[in-house]
Amino acid sequence: MLQDSSHATHPGERTRLAGLLFIISAPSGSGKSTLVHELRSVEKHLDFSVSNTTRSPRGSEEDGREYHFVARERFEQMIAEDELLEYAEVFGNYYGTARSALSESFAHGRDLLLDIDVQGAEQVRQRIPEAVSIFILPPAPEVLKMRLTNRSRAEGKVDESVIQCRLDKAQHEIENYHKYKYVLVNDVLERAVDELSAIVKAERYLHDGDDLNRPGVQKVLAIAESCQVSHSAERLRPVLGAFGVPISAEPAQI
Ligand code: ADP
Ligand code: 5GP
């Protein structure tokens, strides 16, 4: 088992982890929270890192469950005291992952999932190269707009400017898709959950040195492989095209 020195992840430093660290990013409204919720109901021993944010709670969100909602001054204190593994400013608010999230999960023999934006994912990849990164694409811009609108309606607050701001940011975020190891399209929810679950299983088999000839294992590995960005140009072309993002010629950073 690799040593967990995650508490020592400072800029320029690289570390190795005791457990698996999954990073998941997606434009807001793609269905990432929905997918993570479904994934955690099927894959056990997977902690979700509750981020800190300066934004206000939305809908039925509760402090300590979806986020730790903190004042800007408190967040700036966390930055100054180097308590964060990564942080970024998104839509005018700070969001960040506490360093302690990693050590706590790994100490309990669990893997950890970070739901963070593309800026935060970049910081984590620099510091923890073996982190497994997954990007979720919405199937098309109209679908993304519809999901953002439906979610706002369900929360009783449709603010067109907030929705437009999230749509505008989506293209920039999607341009980063090729930096992730895996890319999923969240079209049919059940299929996206199956793919996400196969990725987690496959990474666990490989990390744990499991017997890959056990029944069912090859099928899981094949699903996960089909989601690797390096195998996905044809699958992703129409979706990326709809968002005005070209297929990247750059090799994935995996
Ligand atoms: P995110 O966490 O990416 O911001 P959410 O998980 O809040 O997005 O999902 C945004 C909206 O889209 C929610 O109303 C959710 O129920 C819906 N949604 C998520 N995935 C799907 C899907 N595959 N098909 C249809 N609706 C979906
Ligand atoms: P939302 O306000 O919709 O919950 O999240 C907005 C964006 O912030 C999403 O892209 C989400 O992934 C990102 N985010 C949530 N927590 C963190 C975090 O701890 N760090 C970073 N960098 N981004 C985060």
Image (spheres, rainbow, N blue to C red):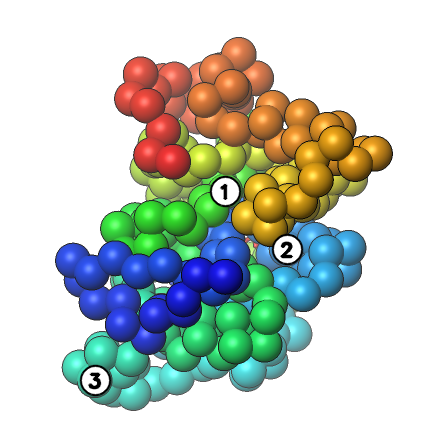
Q: Is mark 2 within 8 Å of ligand 1?
A: yes
Work out whether 162 lies above or below 193: below
Residue 198 at x, y percent in the picture: 68, 39
Is residue 166 found left or right of 41 in the rendered image? left
Residue 201 at x, y percent in the picture: 67, 45
Is residue 252 found left or right of 144 in the rendered image? left
Mark found first going from the N terminus, 2 or 3: 2
Q: Are marks 1 and 3 in contact (CB under 8 Å)?
A: no
Q: What residue is at 79 percent from the left and 36 percent from the top?
A: 214
Q: Secondary structure at mark 2?
A: helix
**What's the amino acid at mark 1?**
Ile
Q: Is mark 3 within 8 Å of ligand 2?
A: no
Q: What residue is at 69 percent from the left and 35 percent from the top?
A: 212
Q: Nearer the viewer, residue 108 or 179?
A: 108
Residue 196 at x, y percent in the picture: 65, 42
Residue 167 at x, y percent in the picture: 43, 41
Category of crowding for the residue at label 2, using alpha-carbon neighbours closer than 10 angstroms: few (below 14), some (14–19), many (at least 20): some
Q: Secondary structure at mark 1?
A: strand
Q: Give residue 36's mark.
A: 2
The residue indicated by pointer 3 is: 81
**What's the amino acid at mark 3?**
Glu
Give the Cα distance between marks 1 and 3: 29 Å
Q: Residue furthest right?
A: 215
**What's the amino acid at mark 2?**
Val
Q: What residue is at 36 percent from the left and 59 percent from the top?
A: 16
Mark found first going from the N terminus, 1 or 3: 3
Q: Nearer the viewer, residue 25 or 231?
A: 231
Category of crowding for the residue at label 1, using alpha-carbon neighbours closer than 10 angstroms: few (below 14), some (14–19), many (at least 20): many
The residue indicated by pointer 1 is: 134
